[in-house]
Image (tube, coloured by chain):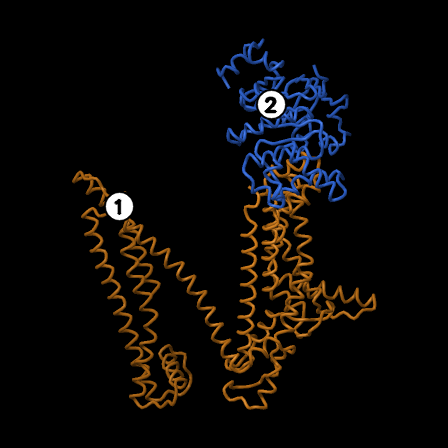
Amino acid sequence: MNIVLIFLITIFSISLFFYGKSKTKTISIKDNIKLNALPKFYGYYLVLWCSIPALVFLLVWSLFEPVIIKSIIIETAANQGAIFSDKNEANLIYEKIKAIHLGTYFGDIDSILRESALAYAKFINLFTNSKVVLIFGIIIASVIYSLKKIKNNNKARDDVEVILKGLLFVSSLIAILTTLGIIFSLLFESIKFFSVINVFDYLFGTNWSPQRAFVRDASSITAAEFEELKDAFGFIPLIAGTSFIAFIAMLVAVPIGLFSGIYMAEYASIKVRRISKPIIEILAGIPTVVYGFFAALTVGPFFRQVGENLGLTVSSESALAAGLIMGIMIIPYVSSLSDDVINSVPQSLRDGSYAVGATKSETIKQVVIPAALPGIIGSVLLAVSRAIGETMIVVMAAGLAANLTINPLESTTTITTQIVMILVGDQEFDSPKTQSAFALGLTLFIATLILNYIAQRAVKKYREKYD
Amino acid sequence: MNNIKIKSKNLNVYYGNKQALFDVNLDLNEKEVTALIGPSGCGKSTFIRCINRMNDVIDICKVTGNIEMDGMNINDKDLDVVSLRERVGMVFQKPNPFPKSIYDNISYGPKIHGKGETKSELDQIVENSLKKSALWEEVKDRLDEPGTSLSGGQQQRLCIARAISVNPEVILMDEPCSALDPIATAKIEELIDELKKTYTIVIVTHSMAQAVRVSQKTGFFHLGKLIEVGKTEKIFKNPDNKMTQDYITGRFG
């Protein structure tokens, strides 16, 4: 029904556009007056007036209709003698009634349910009809209003500008509100978690084993259970694993990325550059899950084989394999960005260096790189936050056990991996185990936020150094 | 009459298919200022960039013919460009100090050529270069401030000091005053007058007045050809060529 309505509104708006355009033209010719705006603006004006009020009304109606119908139906069911003690049971009865109406209910149907289902059908019908009537009413009213305005040769151009500005504002508002919503949901769930687990136990604990936390209800924890839980949520192994894998990734990505960026910017001929730059950037387009199974199925076993030949014990899921592949994934971020910043160093600086007799590599090392340093730092920090946030490769290649280790050949784990592990499968939403995922998310969010802030400050501080 | 320092014979320069210089024969005298004048795009800058092989930086540029300094062929492809540029310094149109401290800007060249091994030797080179470029008094208390913090005229004198720091024999100047105000320009011209006692100087300029003020010899380029060359006094008072006459009196260009 809603789709039909939206379709009708669209058709109607489009025809109004052409009507408004030709109408104002004839007015201006007939009465020989100068229009306040181009004819097409009167068309836009009609379109906006015809569609926006109706669509907004439709949206609001669709949001509130189910809620209102639900409360009415539950009330009628109660009046007919249905018994429910809490909200969950009421919801269950409502879902049953809905299913009967749709013909998908196969349990026993008693008279209460049957009566309620009939009432439900009646209300649905009533609401749909009134929705259609109201929407057409709104369209007619707003079109009459706007047509009257047009006849008076109003300043349609200004009005269209105001409405468009409003639309853009609403779009950015939605983006901001969504971000705030995510932050707050993280925050509230984390607060629940920290009401059970001490913040310091979390931040400085060295043992991470949330599987132990089989507590159904966080509010009814006994003292013994609390002791058990206390050292199950230590953050240290996770941040250590995250930093360790990110560190290995940066060891791979920074030199290779930076050097290839320098080659692209300083040495490569235009032809080589035109071919090789897109090829490197393809690396950034490969889905991380593909990198993940490459790391888990090819690189990991290869390292184990090599390790065995050398007489080392190498876990088939190792920090080294995950870090290495993550580093390769990040290369294009570093190389592409540093290529751009090196290219933006003015040629005059290079000329100045050549003119005193410096060679190309001396010039790059002592003049070009220092001048491009802020941008290079920015690209590296961007790569670091990418490495910290990366999940799939680590899930597949680095293992799940939260070992506190600095041996790259052992398996280790990261914050993001643990979030995945906690939220995969069935879970109780009020157990500390599930809530710990939100605490981890919040910590990760704050860490990347700080990193981004530092990156921006670094770039800002050194920008404009040459000029 | 001073000795000939640099001698070009049938010098041709091509940028891809486009020829930029046609058979240029020009002698530059030692410890003298030679000014090159002519309308934009006539090949003046291209010519001086041949003297320190800066054209090597441009991929599509090809140079044929002979250009000699003290009998050594500059255009020889086996020539060591690093030691050539140690002997032939250059100052550019727009001041281009490195984004480093004033001190590092000057010590950069000597360090590259392995001069000034101890700190005190290096200090001495920096001080001498800044004194020769008449900047010492203005910056001696703030040598560790960035070179880019100086004013435009000071930056250009810093670039001259940078060129002097490796103790060259020739200094090429590509419109060194075009980005400067008249007061800074006057200072640079004064400096050029002083520097010619020690160095052979070639200056490209768009200002006739400047050419008259600073140079002893003037060459007039037009469309890649050297039209006329001679003593500055003669070129500006009584040129042989009608085109030179028209250019210096402002009838074209």
Please tell me the numbered disc located at residue A2. none
- Chain colored orange: A
Image coords of residue A49 (percent x, y): 27, 55
Quarter of the figure with residue B160: top right
Residue for point 66% across, 59% down = A250
How packed mark 2 is, by other alpha carbons closer than 10 Å (few <14, some 14-19, many 20 or more), is many
Q: Looking at numbered disc 2 in the image, what kind of residue is underneath it?
A: Gly
Quarter of the figure with residue B43: top right
Drawn side of residue B247 relative to residue A376, left or right:
left
**Relative to B22, does residue A427 appear above or below in the rendering?**
below
Circle 2/circle 1 CB separation < 8 Å = no
To the question of a shared chain for discs 2 and 1, the answer is: no
Image coords of residue B28 (percent x, y): 68, 19
Q: As rendered, which of A66 and B5 lies closer to the eye?
A: B5
Q: As rendered, which of B224 and A395 lies closer to the eye?
A: B224
Drawn side of residue B56 relative to residue B214, left or right:
right
Q: Secondary structure at mark 2?
A: loop
How packed mark 1 is, by other alpha carbons closer than 10 Å (few <14, some 14-19, many 20 or more), is some
Measure how far apart labels 2 and 1 are at the Cα level: 60 Å
- Chain colored blue: B
Residue for point 68% across, 64% down = A322
Image coords of residue A38 (percent x, y): 27, 43
Q: Looking at numbered disc 1 in the image, what kind of residue is underneath it?
A: Lys
Residue for point 76% across, 67% down = A304
Chain letter behind tag 2? B
Residue topped by disc 2: B43
Residue topped by disc 1: A21
Quarter of the figure with residue B219: top right
Drawn side of residue A151 relative to residue B145, left or right:
left
